[in-house]
Image: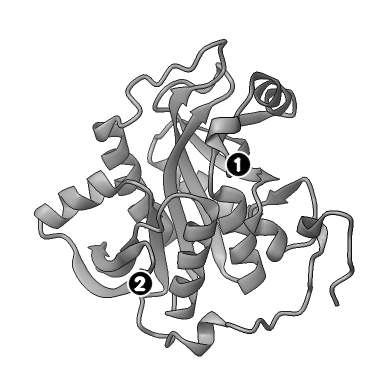
Amino acid sequence: MLRPQVFPILEYDEDPHALINPSDHFSAGVLPERAVLCFFPDVMHMLQEEDELTEITRLQGEYGQAPIYRIQRHNQEIALLNPLVGAPLAAGNLEEAIALGARKILACGGGGRIQKELTAGHLLLPTEAVRDEGMSYHYLPPSRTVVLNPRCVEAVAEFLKEAGVSFLKGKTWTTDAFYRETPGRIAHRREEGCLLVEMECAALAAVAQFRGVDFAQILYGGDDVSGETWSKGRWKRYGIRRQVLELTLDAVLAL
């Protein structure tokens, strides 16, 4: 039951059934059980040119089309898609991928570095995300953060350790408004322990928890928002992005 609040975003409705349900419009079994959400269109284009991808289907919306591909890893099939940037689009496309059959999902992306300890290109395995976006509040009761599935996080952590990959585990900050990352807000997020800022993690984790599927995410440190001025740096570090996707494709098999 929806209980009116002063702020509409806090009016969580626990009813699991909506007027429009993904399962009413998409058939399960179309996608493999394991799926990777990749926010690197440049790297996915490389894989296309190398003939590693086979298109399975396409998600469609006012944004255009979002192809979902099949890729082979260690004799297992994995679905690969770019869920598009921002919590609403990414969460909506995750909903549809789940309805199509995805159950074990690992995302890879990048974020702005809030703490100096996270250097450019260094990996972060989020354990929780500050919910400074709107999407997650439609899937979980109001709270400051959403905790990512500890079992999934540990499975990916163990994979990265065995692969000899350096990474940090910790908190990320999910926001809708990258043009409103004010110095005061950044300082506050730093004080509460956030290492990166990005735009999707809290929403994706909330959708996964609501739908009862496995989810974790690997992020890399991109631009620097920890100082007095923004340092874009080499945000699209193509070599790192390819490595992160390759790691993610292998790591999803650990879920």
Q: Nearer the viewer, residue 156 or 240?
A: 240
> Taking 75 as reference, is 44 above or below it?
above
Question: Can residue 146 be seen in this snapshot?
Answer: yes
Q: Quadrant of residue 222?
A: top left
Q: Secondary structure at mark 2?
A: strand
Q: Is residue 130 left or right of residue 240?
A: right
Residue 193 locus on image (x, y percent): 70, 28
Give the Cα distance between marks 2 and 1: 25 Å
> Which residue sits at x=34%, y=55%?
249
Q: Is residue 193 left or right of residue 216?
A: right
- Indicate which disc residue 60 carries: 2
> Which residue sits at x=69%, y=20%?
187
Q: From the image, tell me which residue sits under label 1.
A: 175
> Taking 93 as reference, is 23 above or below it?
below
- Indicate which disc residue 61 carries: none
> Taking 118 as reference, is 125 above or below it?
below
Q: How is the image coloured?
A: one colour
Residue 63 locus on image (x, y percent): 37, 62
